[in-house]
Image (cartoon, rainbow, N blue to C red):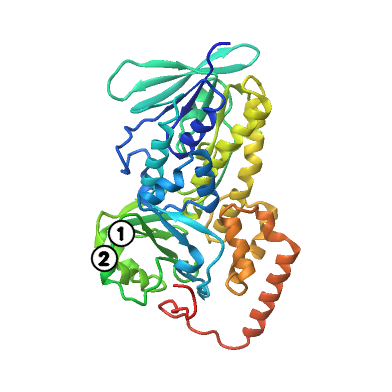
Amino acid sequence: MANTHAIVIGGSMAGLCAARVLSKFYDKVTAIDRDAYPAGAHERPGVPQSRHVHALLMRGRLELDRLFPGFEKTMLERGALEINFGRDFAALRPDGWAERRPNSITTLFASRVLIEATVRELIRRIPNVELIERAEAVGFETVRGASIRVSGVKVNPRDGGASFTLNGDLIIDASGRTTKIPSWIEAMGLPAPPETVVDSHTGYASRWYKVNPERRPKDWWWKGVWIDPVAEDVSTAGVLFPVENNRMIVTMAGIGGHYPPSDEDGFTAQLAHLRSPIIAEEVALAEPMSQVYSYRQMANRWRHYEKWGAQLDGFVALGDSSCAFNPVYGQGMTSGALSALMLGECLKKNGISDIELPRKFFAAQARFQAEPWGLATASDFRIPGTEGKRPMINRVIDPLLGKMFQVANDDPAIGERIGEVINMMKPPSALFEPSLLKLIAKAWSRRLIRGKTPPKETAAMPPLALGAEG
C-alpha cells in the first residue's frame, strides 16, 4: 500500500493537536502555517489574540498532557503557575466578592505563547510530523468523479520561493475563525456550509506588566483577580492573570459595544473605574512591559458542516475553523484539542479509507460543539444588544442559569459543579441534575428571605478570608 499522507492547514493549537492525532494513523503528516515559528515563547502575527488572557481549562490541561506526554512537566519547569481559582483568585461577582474557598479544579496559568511553544517542541519529536513554516495554503487540488474529492493543497511560500502542491489523503482545515476555505468551496461550485452567528459586541484591551513581589502588601493573598461587569451599571469586566516569569496580563472586556480604551492613558484611567480598585492598585505597583493591545473579533460563529448539503470527500474542518466561541469564556484551546481527539476516535472506528469519514466526524464534532456553544451563547444573550437568533430552549434555560450563577457562592456544591462544567470536566447536563436543582432552589429561597433586609454595599477590596488556606 502506498504511503498515506494527511495535511493540516494551520499550525496553531487545534492544528498541532490534529497533527499529533493523525500521526498515529498516517505514514506522514504535514502542518502548514503562514508564520515563521519563533524560537521559544514569543508572539507571532497569526495569533493576534495571544497577547490577551488565555485560560487553559482543567480538561485542556489533562488532554494536552495526554496528547503530548511531558506537556505539564515542561510547562511547570518553564514557569507556568498552578492556580486553584476558588483559593487563589479574588472574584467580584455581580452581588459581591466570592467567598475564598478551595475547590477541586486546579489549572495551569501561563502565556499563550508558552503553551504553543511547548506543544511545538513536543510535536517536533514525532518523526512522521513535518511543520512547514512561512507557507500559505491558497487552494485545493481536487479529483472529480461521482463526487468531488480533495486530493491536495496548493501552497505559496512566503519567502518568494516557487509554488508547489502537496498531495494528501485527508486535508484538515485548522486555520482558525478567519479561514478562507469556505470561499474555496464556493469557487468549486459547492455551497458554503450554513452559519450561525451570535455577537454580543464584546472587545478586549490588554497590557502586560512586570510584577515586583516585594512591593505587594502582605495581606494581598490573591494571585489573580476577576471582576464581573454589571450590564446595567458597569459594562466593563476586568481580569488580572499571573503568568510565568513574574509577569501579569491585565485585560478589560467591554460588553454590548462599550469597548475599553486602547491608549495607555485611557486604559489606566478605565481600570480605576471598574467595580473595585484592586486591579488599578496592582498596576500602580507594577512596571508596564507593553503597549495596550485591542481585539474585537469575538463573535460566536458556528459553520454547520454537520448540516452541509454538499459532499467533499477527503476534507474535514475542526477547531475555530468549524466553531469559534467568544474567547472571553476560555473554551477555544480545550475545544480544539477535544475535536482533534474526536477525529482520532472516528479514524480508529472507521479506518482511514472510509469515504464517509468527513460526514461521520462532522456529526460527532457537532454533538460535542453544541455544549460549549450553548454555554457561551447563553451567557452572551444575557448581554443587552446581543445579535443572533436565540433558540427557544434558551429562553427557558437562560433564567435558570442566571439564578444558578447568582447562588454559586451560597453553597459549595453549586459552585463546585459549575466549575466542573466550565472546565469541561462534566457536560452541561450535569447542571440540571435533580439533586443540584434542589440545592439551587434552597439557596434561592434563602436569598428571597434575606432580600427583605437592605443589601450590604459591596466592599471595594476582597475579604481577607480568615481561616482560608493561604
Looking at the picture, tell me which residue is in the foreground, 186 or 60.
Answer: 60
Which residue is outermost to the right?
Answer: 434
- State the image coordinates of residue 155 (x, y, percent, origin top left): 39, 20
At 37% from the left and 46% from the top, the residue drawn is 114
Write down the quadrant of residue 41 in the picture: top left
Looking at the picture, tell me which residue is in the foreground, 322 or 387.
Answer: 322
Mark pair 1, 2: CA separation: 7 Å
Looking at the picture, tell me which residue is in the foreground, 138 or 427.
Answer: 427
- State the image coordinates of residue 150 (x, y, percent, origin top left): 54, 19
The amino acid type, in three-letter code, at marker 1 is: Asn
Q: Earlier in the sequence, mark 1 or mark 2?
A: 2
At 54% from the left and 17% from the top, the residue drawn is 4
- Left or right of residue 90: residue 143: right
SS under mark 1: loop
The amino acid type, in three-letter code, at marker 2 is: Asn
Vertical arrangement, residue 134 with respect to residue 438, above or below:
above
Vertical arrangement, residue 316 with respect to residue 444, above or below:
above
Write down the quadrant of residue 365 in the picture: top right
Task: Report the residue marked by disc 2.
Answer: 212
Which residue is outermost to the bottom?
Answer: 453
Quadrant including the N terminus: top right
Residue 229 visible in image: no
Q: Kindly identify which numbered label has been placed on residue 246.
A: 1
Decide: marks 1, 2 in contact (CB < 8 A)?
yes
